[in-house]
């Protein structure tokens, strides 16, 4: 489904912002109780974190570092249409979550950064594969302004889920390879 105008796309991004913010406020005022809903690799109850983990952040700093890029990348990805946005989001969330659950460190993996890296991977590759000028321009802009994200796929800190970054990025590239040439 093609979104007919910018205001529809902005409304969707606004609701993403609202949902993530509500979850953050609840988590903040419950002493980070929602963190237990994260993705815990190879632990059966941790499977719920595949779907819930991207909504939960470990601190205000973590939330603020994710909210702007997820909103910007969501808006840019909506340029491919709502259906494509939903397909990419589903593949990225499930692909990242399952791969982290299978191969990640034994730790709680939370936050939207895996989705951000998935969107980043998709946006950088998909425009070039689509062959459409507008989408190629988006790819160039994302690579130029956010290219430094690529370093986040490498281990850097015991408190950062580089696995989510890596598997998110790979999932985004897979989504681009699957669907970019069918861009509307």
Image (cartoon, rainbow, N blue to C red):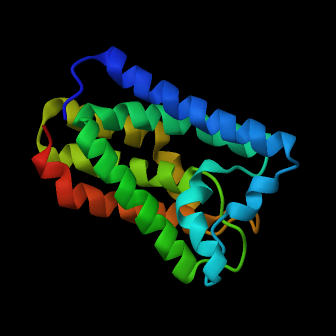
Q: Is residue 36 above or below residue 25?
A: below
Q: Where in the figure is residue 141, as x and y percent of width and height?
A: 36, 34
Which quadrant of the view contains residue 91?
bottom left
Question: Residue sitting at 59 percent across and 29 percent down?
Answer: 18
Give the position of the C terminus as an image quadrant: top left
In-image side of 108 versus 154 (left or right)? right
Furthest toward the right, the residue is: 31
In this view of the protein, which residue sits in the foreground, 30 or 149?
30
Q: Is residue 22 above or below residue 154?
A: above
In-image side of 10 versus 125 (left or right)? right
Which quadrant of the view contains residue 161?
bottom right
In-image side of 112 versus 110 (left or right)? left
Question: Residue sitting at 48 percent across and 73 percent down?
Answer: 98
Q: Where in the figure is residue 14, as x and y percent of width and height?
A: 50, 25
Give the position of the N terminus as an image quadrant: top left
Number of callouts: 0
Q: Where in the figure is residue 70, as x and y percent of width and height?
A: 51, 39
Q: Where in the figure is residue 52, as x and y percent of width and height?
A: 59, 57
In this view of the protein, which residue sits in the foreground, 44 or 96?
44
Question: Residue sitting at 34 percent across and 20 percent down?
Answer: 8
Question: Residue sitting at 49 percent across and 52 percent down?
Answer: 115
């Amino acid at each position: 489904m093609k979104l007919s105008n910018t205001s529809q796309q902005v409304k969707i991004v606004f609701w993403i912002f609202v949902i993530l913010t509500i979850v953050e406020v609840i988590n903040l005022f419950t002493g980070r109780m929602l963190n237990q809903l994260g993705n815990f690799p190879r632990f059966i109850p941790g499977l719920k974190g595949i779907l819930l983990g991207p909504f939960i952040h470990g601190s205000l700093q973590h939330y603020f570092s994710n909210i702007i890029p997820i909103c910007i990348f969501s808006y840019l990805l909506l340029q491919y249409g709502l259906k494509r946005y939903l397909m990419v989001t589903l593949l990225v969330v499930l692909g990242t979550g399952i791969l982290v659950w299978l191969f990640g460190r034994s730790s709680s993996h939370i936050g939207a950064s895996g989705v951000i890296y998935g969107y980043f991977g998709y946006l950088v590759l998909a425009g070039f594969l689509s062959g459409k000028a507008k989408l190629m321009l988006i790819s160039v802009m994302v690579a130029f302004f956010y290219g430094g994200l690529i370093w986040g796929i490498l281990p850097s800190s015991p408190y950062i889920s580089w696995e989510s970054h890596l598997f998110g990025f790979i999932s985004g590239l897979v989504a681009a390879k699957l669907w970019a040439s069918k861009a509307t």
